[in-house]
């Protein structure tokens, strides 16, 4: 699992001194409490300078370490995109040009360019309605992958539709029995009763064993349209899962992919989801995410969500997901298609044309580096 570097720990431990070394922040620190309209939005708490941003106190980042913090979050969450990285940072920190710096750093990330391939929108996908956790769970398989020492070759992806909370289970065989074991022996004992599952039309999900076990467990089953795998909401996570796998295994043997699944789950569940505008684990588990830096600074929010607040946040998240779905449905199929013009001498990446194999799923999407010639 990816660990925090000593350099990052040193930044958090010496944050107050780093703020003092920043000329702009030092000027503010020296004048906090002396009056003035602007300075009223700043305060010192345990020698850390906070700035009031939209009714929430956030820690001012010294300019000397802003890039390091951005890259720390970007790398920790397996090279998350601009929106997710920004959302995680803005939970606790503020900086005058944080969005611009984040976009520039991620755009120039070498690993992101190599393992993340662009796609074209062929048709808008509507959301599947669900208004509460465990009301509807989508299930799909990812694989086959390189066989691990434990003989794992597939991943069972379990997605809670309402909250977007994801669980990943490594299994030896893509079978209905394996899914039933994951649901009945781990998922439901840990999180509670599932009302309905959504699956594709594979033989794993049409057998008599599958139907009888679900009936005994009091779980309804619904199947997606035949020959249309993208109708399964869990299928839409496969691209992100593949990207996370390639990043996590960039410097590791590919047969160790099962060891990275807990961290990949964290990247899915503890970061901002663009559809719901919320963090999946907070909606599903009912408690705020604890960040690594929380142990270094005073915590200004309650960790446990009250039932009333949780209900409000879930309603807002599901409503936003429906709004986003309706917006996509109104757009043209090719609205996101764009073309980039290259000039002679430009350095470019070339898409890798790998022979289909299990290892190709976590192989680099692009090969470096080619020069454009006239």
Image (tube, rainbow, N blue to C red):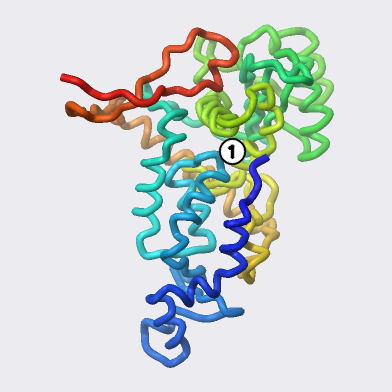
Q: Position of residue 230 (x, y in %)?
A: 50, 20
Residue position marked by numbered label 1 in the rendering: 164
Which x, y percent locates residue 102?
40, 51
- Where in the figure is residue 175, as x and y percent of width and height? 73, 13
Residue 373 image offset from top left, x and y in percent:
19, 20
Q: Residue at x 35, y 21 (%)?
A: 350
Q: Residue at x 37, y 33 (%)?
A: 328
Name the foreground residue: 102 vs 284.
Answer: 102
Where disc 1 sits, the SS reads loop
Q: In the picture, which quadrant includes the C terminus?
A: top left
Q: How many C-alpha atoms fall within 10 Å of the one at disc 1: few (<14), some, or many (≥20)?
A: many
Please, is residue 288 above or below residue 218 in the view? below
Between 168 and 132, the one lying in front of the other is 168
Q: Please determine whether, in this image, residue 250 is positioned above or below residue 231.
A: below
Q: Nearer the viewer, residue 90 or 334?
A: 90
Which residue is found at the position 77% from the left and 35% from the top? 193
In the displayed structure image, the side of residue 209 where residue 330 appears, left or right: left
**In the visual, does 85 lie left or right of 299?**
left
Quadrant of the rendering where the N terminus is positioned: top right
């Amino acid at each position: 699992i990816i660990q925090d570097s000593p350099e990052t720990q040193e930044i958090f431990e010496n944050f107050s001194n780093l703020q003092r070394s920043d000329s702009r922040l030092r000027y503010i620190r020296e004048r906090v409490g002396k009056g003035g309209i602007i300075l009223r939005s700043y305060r010192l708490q345990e020698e850390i300078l906070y700035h009031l941003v939209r009714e929430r106190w956030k820690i001012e980042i010294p300019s000397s370490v802003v890039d390091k913090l951005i890259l720390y979050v970007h790398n920790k969450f397996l090279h998350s995109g601009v929106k997710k990285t920004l959302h995680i940072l803005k939970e606790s920190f503020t900086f005058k040009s944080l969005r611009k710096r984040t976009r520039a750093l991620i755009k120039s990330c070498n690993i992101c360019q190599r393992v993340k391939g662009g796609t074209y929108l062929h048709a808008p996908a509507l959301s599947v309605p669900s208004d509460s956790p465990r009301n509807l769970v989508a299930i799909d398989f990812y694989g086959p992958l390189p066989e691990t020492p434990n003989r794992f070759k597939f991943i069972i992806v379990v997605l809670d539709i309402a909250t977007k909370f994801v669980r990943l289970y490594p299994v030896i065989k893509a079978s209905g029995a394996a899914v039933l074991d994951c649901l009945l022996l781990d998922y439901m004992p840990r999180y509670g009763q599932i009302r309905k599952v959504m699956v594709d039309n594979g033989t794993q999900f049409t057998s008599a064993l599958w139907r009888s076990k679900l009936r005994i467990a009091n779980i309804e089953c619904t199947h997606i349209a035949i020959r249309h795998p993208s109708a399964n909401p869990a299928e839409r996570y496969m691209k992100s899962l593949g990207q996370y796998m390639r990043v996590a295994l960039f410097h590791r043997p590919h047969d160790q992919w099962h060891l990275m699944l807990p961290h990949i789950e964290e990247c899915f569940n503890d970061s901002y989801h663009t559809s719901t505008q919320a963090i999946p684990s907070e909606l599903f588990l009912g408690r705020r995410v604890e960040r690594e830096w929380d142990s270094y600074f005073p915590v200004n929010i309650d960790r446990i969500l009250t039932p009333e607040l949780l209900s409000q946040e879930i309603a807002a998240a599901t409503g936003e997901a429906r709004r986003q779905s309706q917006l996509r449905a109104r757009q043209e199929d090719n609205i996101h298609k764009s073309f980039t013009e290259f000039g002679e001498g430009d350095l470019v990446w070339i898409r890798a044309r790998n022979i289909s194999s299990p290892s190709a799923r976590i192989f680099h999407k692009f090969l470096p580096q080619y020069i454009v010639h006239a």
